[in-house]
């Protein structure tokens, strides 16, 4: 039987605030345990939460960037459950009235087509603390530094039909929150993670199948693996005459499989109710208009502008706008290089990205800054160096040997563009290789490359390649 | 609305309360009475009335995103039953 996969994602994106959502404790990652957990985060008696204005602004930005409604009135609710890393016995979240709802995002798929994924809602909530299960003589250690960290939970419609689409959607949201500057998107530190609701149904059937929820997936690769495994598992169950159980499952990255997490007698019942400690959040039109005004250029708009303004291909523009950092780097370098868009794009996507990859380096702290790369490209443009020599200059800049001009001067890499000088060198080459000349003139035209190579060798690659070609042709054929 | 013994057991479990089996019929009766009392509200026609989220006719005050709380770990951990390496220790929660 042919099956159709139905997926909905719940993405948790940590908001990049200084302080927590309901308290003035710091959100800095990696601090000593419990040094950033104040009385509110510990749930001590008598404390009251006070909402951070930044989280409201950030949620509104996300809403506007995803064509969603930013709710004029939203309400915080208590989600009740017991776990030691949740000291209050409830998580403050939003339930019936989330701050953002009913939007969408257009996602580009591998075949070049575009697909619209609905966003059901995005709500604000606090993160829980961390439980450490190792080595405390049979006890669990609790670190509450993360408790109260602001999260935006972004819930998609069940519009996703494959693991690849899920990854494309997740990447798009990841890029978006980073563009907006509302989350650092750091997946290693857990700032960006997702739960996947996966079900299958016979192709053509309207009704959804029973779904399983895979919790806490923290990389794009794992999302794809987890969904693919889960789909295969459900097909096996159904084709074997069984039934899929609605349950929470955990992805085991080492074994590439999902495992049932909670037994059914512990079926969740969160007993949500409006939190009496918090009043409804009301946002008027002027506030929303001001947030809209503050939105940066979105990835899709930037991509379109790169194509029209810098003459880039859709493909190149897509790569360069994948992150805001790369897009900013490209634009800064292209400007220094005298608006040489295509050349700059080639270098950023080629040499620079390769070097960043090789040395496991982030573009925001690249040893070769946008200014430096732009300065070097300017020297290619004005004929001071060839593209080939530029690779040598780039590597020297990468190793910290200074700007392009300094490297060119220090290493004597200036291109030889003096026709008389090049002609002299060519004559020497021809004098030293009479046999090859004979063969060339006898019809082995491929030997032309040999002569170019010899000239380049004699000049350590500094001769202007275009001139070498022209002059060689003249002397050999003429 | 009336609750039976299994409802009472489930509610007790969700609230992590240990209850005496002999007390269950009494709890079921009392809880059912409370629900019946509240159920009277269902007789009011609330068509077109916006659900009330808070009894105060006020909206949420927001605070600026500034870190105001320093490290008070030592102070807070004085009242904790057990700590180690800065962590609060609790009975093991993983099977």
Image: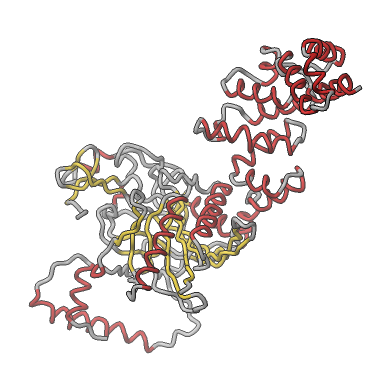
Residue A444 image point, x, y percent: 79, 27
How many marks are shown on the rendered structure? 0
Q: Residue at 60% across / 17% down in the picture?
A: A401
Residue placed farthest to the right in the image? A478
Quadrant for the C terminus of chain A in the image: top right
Q: Is residue A221 visible?
A: yes
Q: Name which quarter of the figure residue B88 lies in.
A: top left
Give the side of residue A163 with respect to residue A352, left or right.
Answer: left
Q: Nearer the viewer, residue A351 or B3?
A: A351
- Residue A462 shows in this picture: no
Seen in the picture, residue B35 relative to A266 is either above or below; the reply is: below
Q: Position of residue A334 (x, y in %)?
A: 72, 35
Quick check: B34 left or right of A304? left
Residue A437, compared with residue A86, is above or below; it is above
Residue located at (44% from left, 46% from top): A187
Say which quadrant the N terminus of chain A sits in: bottom left
Q: Position of residue B61 (x, y in %)?
A: 46, 57
Picture colour scheme: secondary structure
Q: In this rendering, would A429 be left or right of A197?
A: right
- In the displayed orientation, state which residue is furthest to the left: B22
Q: Nearer the viewer, residue A295 or A353?
A: A353
Vertically, is A269 above or below A91? below
Q: Residue at x 18, y 51 (%)?
A: B92
Front residue of A119/A407: it is A407
Which is more toward the observer, A193 or B76? Answer: A193
Residue A357: % across, % down: 53, 35
């Amino acid at each position: 039987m042919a099956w159709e996969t139905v997926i909905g994602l719940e993405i948790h994106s940590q908001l990049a605030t200084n302080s927590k959502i309901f308290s003035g404790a710091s959100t800095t990652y990696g601090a000593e345990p419990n040094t950033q957990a104040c009385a509110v985060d510990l749930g001590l008696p008598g404390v009251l939460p006070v909402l951070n204005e930044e989280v409201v602004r950030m949620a509104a930005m996300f809403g506007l960037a995803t064509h969603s409604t930013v709710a004029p009135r939203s309400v915080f609710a208590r989600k009740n459950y017991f776990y030691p890393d949740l000291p209050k016995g409830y998580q403050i979240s939003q339930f019936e009235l989330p701050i953002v709802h009913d939007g969408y995002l257009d996602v580009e798929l591998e075949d070049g087509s575009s697909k619209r994924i609905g966003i059901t809602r995005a709500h604000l909530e606090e993160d829980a603390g961390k439980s450490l299960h190792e080595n405390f003589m049979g006890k669990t250690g609790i670190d509450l530094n993360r408790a109260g960290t602001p999260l935006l939970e972004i819930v998609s419609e069940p519009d996703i039909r494959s693991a690849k689409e899920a990854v494309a959607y997740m990447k798009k949201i990841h890029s978006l929150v980073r563009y907006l500057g509302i989350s650092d998107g750091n997946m290693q530190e857990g700032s960006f993670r997702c739960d996947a609701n996966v079900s299958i149904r016979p192709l053509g059937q309207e009704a959804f199948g029973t779904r399983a929820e895979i919790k806490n997936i923290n990389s794009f690769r794992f999302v794809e693996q987890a969904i693919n495994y889960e789909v295969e598992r459900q097909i096996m169950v159904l084709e074997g005459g069984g039934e899929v159980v609605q349950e929470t499952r955990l992805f085991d990255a080492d074994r590439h499989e999902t495992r049932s997490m909670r037994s059914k007698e512990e079926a969740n019942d969160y007993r949500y109710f409006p939190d009496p400690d918090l009043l409804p959040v009301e946002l008027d039109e002027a506030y929303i208009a001001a947030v809209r005004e503050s939105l940066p250029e979105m990835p899709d708009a930037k991509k379109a502008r790169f194509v029209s303004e810098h003459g880039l291909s859709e493909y190149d523009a897509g790569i360069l706008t994948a992150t805001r950092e790369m897009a900013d780097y490209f634009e800064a370098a292209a400007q220094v290089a005298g608006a040489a868009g295509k050349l700059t794009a080639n270098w950023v996507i080629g040499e620079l990205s390769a070097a960043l990859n090789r040395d496991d380096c982030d573009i925001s702290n690249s040893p070769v800054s946008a200014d430096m790369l732009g300065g070097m490209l300017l020297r290619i443009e004005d004929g001071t160096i060839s593209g080939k020599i530029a690779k040598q200059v780039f590597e020297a800049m990468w190793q910290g040997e200074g700007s392009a001009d300094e490297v060119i001067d220090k290493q004597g890499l200036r291109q030889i563009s003096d026709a008389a000088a090049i002609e002299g060198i060519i004559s020497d080459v021809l004098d030293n290789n009479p046999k090859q000349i004979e063969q060339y003139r006898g019809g082995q035209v491929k030997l032309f490359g040999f002569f170019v190579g010899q000239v380049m060798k004699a000049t350590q690659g500094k001769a202007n390649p275009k001139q070498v070609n022209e002059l060689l042709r003249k002397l050999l054929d003429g | 609305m009336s609750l039976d013994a299994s409802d009472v057991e489930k509610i007790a479990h969700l609230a992590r309360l240990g209850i005496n089996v002999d007390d269950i019929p009494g709890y079921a009766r009392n809880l059912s009475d409370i629900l019946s009392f509240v159920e009277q509200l269902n007789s009011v026609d609330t068509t077109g009335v916006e659900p009330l989220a808070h009894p105060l006719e006020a909206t949420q005050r927001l605070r600026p995103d500034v870190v105001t709380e320093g490290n008070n770990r030592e102070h807070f951990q004085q009242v904790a039953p057990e700590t180690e390496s800065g962590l609060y220790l609790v009975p093991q929660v993983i099977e």
